[in-house]
Amino acid sequence: MSLPHAQPVLRFHRLIPAARAPQRASRDGAGTLPIRAARYCDAVTTACAWGYWVFAPMDLSLYWDGDSLFWSCALFPEWMALDDAAQFPHFADAFDAMAPEAARGAAPPFLTRLPEPGAVQIWTGLIARTAPDWSLVIRPPVNLPLSGGYTLFEGILEPDLWCGPLFANLRLTRSHAPVRLAADLPLLQVQPLPRLAYGEAAHAMELAEGLGAAEWEAYGRDIVAPNADPDRAPGRYARAARRRRRCPAHADA
């Protein structure tokens, strides 16, 4: 699938100016990967670098007592009940000032309490749009430990079809203690994905018993021979994978 060079696969629209801009995810997991993994494990580093980190638009804290939900932030340090939804501070008026008349009064909520116990939806302050036939995987940051007290739901959004807020759905897993979300730490990782990659064609699978001749040959090349060589340099697969990405025509050279 090819796209005109002038047309980006993914475009973010920032509606909350205070929100941190999305950032290309790094291969080293923001410096948290072990050095050996960052240097030699291309599978891990490629997964880390696929997509963009998206952040909460402000520092905030959530509190769940097993029944009721509360939230607070620097502007409003006292705990406020989250019974339904809450707007980002002062955003509703700013939204109406920028929106055409027909859209006024329809500002996306910042926090929304979901029906499931301890579940909250957080808006990032962004709207994402993709090129035709491209979707967006929404998931926790890859190989980057969460701060604790919550888990994130994963999803696949089709922003070429739907123009709405880019949000995170999370479930609090700790009650009777604050769960803090920092605006300078990634909240989500979003990854552009061709729709073909998860359509029915992508589910054509077969199971083979054992290996065929071609697979045994490849196994010997990739596993047996390197392990029989006491002087082998580590990271052969990582070098080959990087070389293929840089110059596909010479990947096997």
Image (cartoon, rainbow, N blue to C red):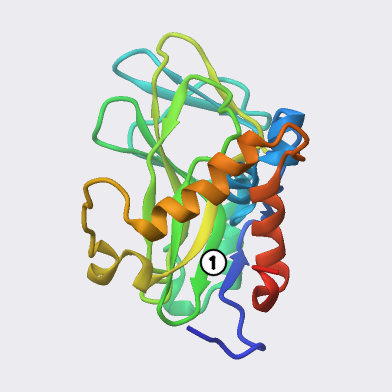
Q: Is residue 154 left or right of residue 250?
A: left
- Identified at 67% across, 57% down, the residue is 240
Residue 18 shows in this picture: no
**How many numbered callouts?**
1
Query: Does residue 123 appear left or right of residue 144 in this picture?
Result: left
Using residue 116 as the reference point, say whether residue 56 is left or right of it: right
Q: Label 1: few (<14), some or many (≥20) within 10 Å? A: some
According to the image, label 1 marks what residue? 96
Q: Nearer the viewer, residue 143 or 44?
A: 44
Residue at (77% x, 40% y) in the render: 233
Q: Residue at x 38, y 24 (%)?
A: 69
Q: Residue at x 70, y 69 (%)?
A: 253
Q: Secondary structure at mark 1?
A: helix
> Looking at the picture, which amino acid does disc 1 mark?
Asp
Residue lying at the far top of the rendered structure? 176
Q: Position of residue 244 (x, y in %)?
A: 66, 66
Residue 118 percent location from the top left of the image: 34, 25
- When asked about the image quadrant of residue 145, the answer is top right
**Is 231 in front, or is 9?**
231
